[in-house]
Amino acid sequence: MIWNQKAAIGRLIRLISAVSIVIFSMQAASAQEIEPRIALIIGNGSYGAVTALDNPVPDAELMAQTLEQKGFKVTILTDASQISLNRAIAQFGRDLREAGPNATGLFYYAGHAVQSFGNNYLLPVDASLTDAADLSLVAVPAQAVLRQMFSAKNKTNIVILDACRNNPFEAIPDLNDNGLAEMKSPTGTFLAYSTAPGAVALDGLDGNSPFTKALAREIPAAGVPIEQVFKNVRVKVIEETQGQQTPWDTSSLTDDFYFVAQEEKTKEEIAEQQLWESVKFSTDPVPVVLFMRGYPDSEHIPEARALLEKIINSELDQGTATAGAQAQQEAPPLEIAAAEPEPAPAPEPAPVDTTKEQERLIGIAQSSGTAGDYQAYLDAFPEGIYAEFAVFELKVLAEKAERAAAAAQAPTEQQEIVVAAAPSRAAPAPMGTELTWTMPFTSGVDRLIGKSIEELVTLSPLFPPIEGLPEELWKEQSCSNCHQWTKEALCTQGQTYVNAGNNDAVSKQHPYGGGFKMNVRSWAEGGCK
């Protein structure tokens, strides 16, 4: 495994550039004028010559309130006569034309409606009919709404008909068809019916029709396209009416439409997500580590830690498998006893596999964190598989030493932190297996003495757990903010130190100071009492 630090940084720089372009585009889009939304809401219930309906007016009021909250400029008309209904539709068309091609128009109707010769008619409250031939003279054709929308040439139109609750003209010959007919609409139109073509919708028993009630509940959902909104409405209406009513819709939309747009992310959230998308399938640990350092509070940190562990374990497994295969190849074949055995020729020397030795040396360097150990690796393997990583760490350590030297010129609190952070190869003698969760430490740095593990998990670190971590993320912060330091979790961590069988796992300086890891190992050896 080659930790190509320069290549990883190059990829991140290119990604940051791409994210900047995305952010710029989003800013430009947000600067554009908000697309106007215009709605005409009709609710007719107080009919004079046909059966009155209880719910259309409350339905219209509910829909008007819902749409106003979502940015629509709403005109509501209840118990409309034929003249007032025609005037409202004409004004609706003028408003759409004035709003421009980017406007969204929405027409909602609740009340009586009938079909005749494949055409649908909306009934004003003053409609009175004795002959089917007079229907177009007393009603308003639904096609009139679509003609106004077509004339406006706006890109998105929505027509919602919560009608066909029953046929008020069943006794009139040639007007005994139930429900509404499917309508042809101009491109860019979404047509929604409260029930299937030719079927009857229920008026409802609790103040609103099942269809409008479900629609008002679904519209506020953020980031849901209109097609999914009405699919959700259909499911709820079928459930509430026990299958008696199935809402219907047809669409010729050419643009995505959302009643409520998806909540926009901040620039930082966008950059973070884009960076995570670039590294989440990586097989190289360097980009993952850089992500974790750059976004220590990211919601993706648990995934990043799991990915890093997977990459390291995979590399270790490959090294073990390679060593095993090499050993198997080097094993001498079994010979069958012969009467006169001939001496076997001397085997040729097999090439030396240095992988395990390189892993051992780089492991020591990572555990100690000292320049001497990284240099020892480079002296032994100047062209080794971890050479570039070792060079990078030496550079980081050199920069850290320069900062420490500069800080030493003035006796400040920062200097004390830097000195405390310097890794020490000689850890103090640990306590024995008698150590318990609540027993005070008798070894370690001064800050540990007299405090139990239970108390220490609430303290803040002496120096940054990760090189370069901003002070506001660690200084005066409890370590338990970043770690799940429960008794059970620390016991599991202590067992890993025990199972390691050597001091490599506990030799690296801990942010709580020398001796903490060794004491945790002793506590785990004693059964985590």
Image: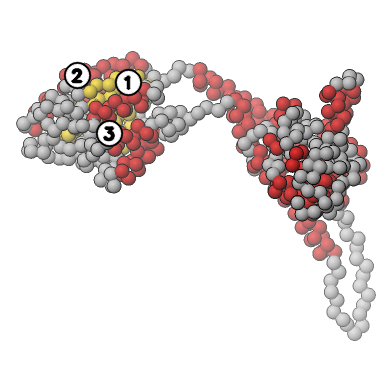
- Identify residue type, mark 3: Asn
Above or below — where is 253 with respect to 324? above
What residue is shown at x 85% (from left), y 50% (from top)? 432
* Left or right: 450 as drawn, with respect to 135: right
* Left or right: 81 as drawn, with respect to 319: left
Which residue is tagged 1? Answer: 74
Give the Cα distance between marks 3 and 1. Answer: 19 Å
Query: 344 or 440: nearer the eye?
Result: 440
Mark 1 closeness class: few <14, some 14–19, many ≥20 residues within 10 Å: some
Quarter of the rendering containing residue 167: top left
Task: Name the disc covering residue 84, or none.
Answer: 2
Which residue is tagged 3? Answer: 208
- Identify residue type, mark 1: Val
Above or below — where is 225 with respect to 155? below
Element under label 3?
Answer: loop
User: Residue 518: image x %, image y %?
Assistant: 84, 46
- Identify residue type, mark 2: Ser
Mark 2 closeness class: few <14, some 14–19, many ≥20 residues within 10 Å: some
Quarter of the rendering containing residue 370: top right
Closer mark to the observer between disc 2 and disc 3: 3
Task: Name the disc covering residue 473, or none.
Answer: none
